Image (cartoon, rainbow, N blue to C red):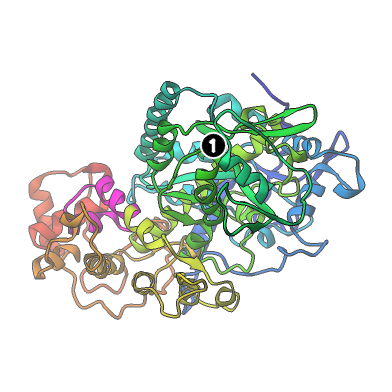
Amino acid sequence: MKYTQILRNTSAVLSISRPRPCFMMTNNTFIFFRIPSSQLLQDALIQLRRKREEVLPDSTGVLVSDISNVYSGDSDKVNRLTIVKDLVNLPSKDDTQLTDEEVMSKFINSASQSDAVLPPSFQRRQIIPMGVPMLDLVRAHLKKPDTWQYPSAAALDIWCENRGISFESLDAMEVRHIRVGGTNEKTIENTNRWVKDKIIEDENEIPIGLVAMEVKTIKITVANLFAIQNAEPLSKIPLSETLEPGICPTGPTCTSPLRNDWIRIPVSIIIGNGITWALSVSLPIIKEDGQRFFVKCATSPELERLLENLPPLVGIGIKEAIYIVESTAPKLGLGDVTLNKFVEMETLMAMAGWLHKSRSRPALAFIMLGTPVNRICPNADGKWWMCFEDVPLAFQVHVLFDIKFIFIVTRLFNVLLREEIVPDPDSACMLSECRQREWLVWWSRWLVNTAVGLYVDQDAMKIAVTREDALHALKALKESGGYLDTIPHRVQLFVLLTEGTITLAEGGARYLHLERERAVRSYRIFQSEPIKSFEHLFKHGIDGSVLLNLRYGQYGYANINARKPIRTRDRLHLVFHSALPLTQLSFVPQDFTIMSLVAAFQRARRSFNEGMLEWARLHPELV
């Protein structure tokens, strides 16, 4: 079924060197400049090669820098209002009689599911510092054969085809709904198994260990909340539309009443990947004769089990969302729900080297995916109180896009950090004596453990100039509030891991031997922070023979110029540096015999082990 007709014929191709894009008007609708996914891939390949042909700067490790001040609250800049106004041709949302639903529907119909959609009023590099979204840089980078096999090319293509918001996204998605008090225990039990199966499918594509979550909330009064808490099951508690000042008792035997005020409660919890599946859990609020009522329901053990057994969670502003869920759940009849640990998206941004002063969702969406987001309809015409499946379709699509956005961007940060810190899977797996998938499961667990409980100190981040500054802005919280003064040990380790690394925005790692040497240093750092069930990956010693095999018999190259440009034919690969003491192994693949291999090893002054390892690394397609 087609939910809307996307304006597919308005796409155009933008050369990266072109200073300013053109745009089109169709049926009086202002259309952002569109760049097809196929063109973005070609642009990304060009940009990676160009970056690698440049001399590296003295200081590296920056993923996104502040090259222009186009993201701000100014009316002539890119912000949440101007994005939507331009895309749907609104003079001003406040000057029209359009409802939130009408604005959101026009926005979705004007966007694109697969193309990048950029504002025409700015040069592309002002919106996206690298000229192409990070999603396309990752896709181009992983095209080479000598890198990690996860995520697959097919998965990356699916992410690219689903980078934007569209009514058509519902065609390929299975969305299940749980209504608290209205869905029976057996159905919730079956849904719990279904969720576990879907999470396993996502993890099989690339191990991440995180589940995307969004929580929609509404305001009720403190008096309403305690009335719900003290009500009997199946009672209907009217919800106040205005705040009545005064104090309210917290229960029949209350000795310390609270001042009546507004308080937020969760009404819908949504998890999933936003591409193939999603689950919503909605609280029972009904409307009769214009009055809203909360229906008190008995606690569901199966629902408690489903929520508490979720893997670690990730989202934007998720700390506050989880606090709202956990602090109000017992009063609302959901039981004493304790959700798993969580990671803030902003923490991942700082870890990855995001030095752009704007960390807003519009900036994140453009730079990571090349797509606009609508953040000017947060109230959904006051309909968030409804069960999620009853909310107007435009708002459902908007929330499911948010889930997809978190799902894809989280995976991109995982890959970007991996390709920066451990760009050579051969050396990592050789030291740990394991296959790629097992190592990546450990890597994701380690990354999550590092990020959990870290938050961005906004004052410190505002003055951050280097990658190390950004990492030092990550702080742990005091129990009494505020940040701890000391730098967490895991942040100190991460600073060591990223010292001298090259991000994908800088063209990615260049020289094979230097990265294999870095793998030894990283291995020893990882050894100092063991993770339960993965100790066997870092129990091995590193003696002289292991080092010689890692170096393919090379020696004495610690001081070679790592900033030197790459001008060889295979410019995206990790290459041999021209200053290495021994020449690169020369071998004709068609002349494949043991004797020819041994002769090639002797000419290159390699032992048999060193030669075989180098040959296998140079010709992964023959192994």
In front: 107, or 392?
Answer: 392
Q: Residue drawn at (19%, 66%), measured in percent from left and top? A: 551
Image spot of residue 462 (x, y percent): 60, 75
| Residue 220 x/y as whole percent | 68, 46
Answer with left or right where residue 238 lies relative to residue 59: right
The front one of 243 and 458 is: 243
Local crowd size for mark 1, using a 10 Å CA cut-off: few (<14), some (14–19), many (≥20): many
Question: Could you tell me the amino acid type at mark 1?
Answer: Gly
The segment highlighted magenta reads 423-444
Left or right for 168, reference 95: left
**Camera-nearest residue between 295 and 2:** 295
Q: Is mark 1 on a helix, strand or loop?
A: loop
Which residue is more in the foreground, 65 or 364?
A: 364
Could you tell me if residue 198 is visible in this image?
yes
Q: Can residue 216 be seen in this view?
A: no
**Residue of label 1:** 274
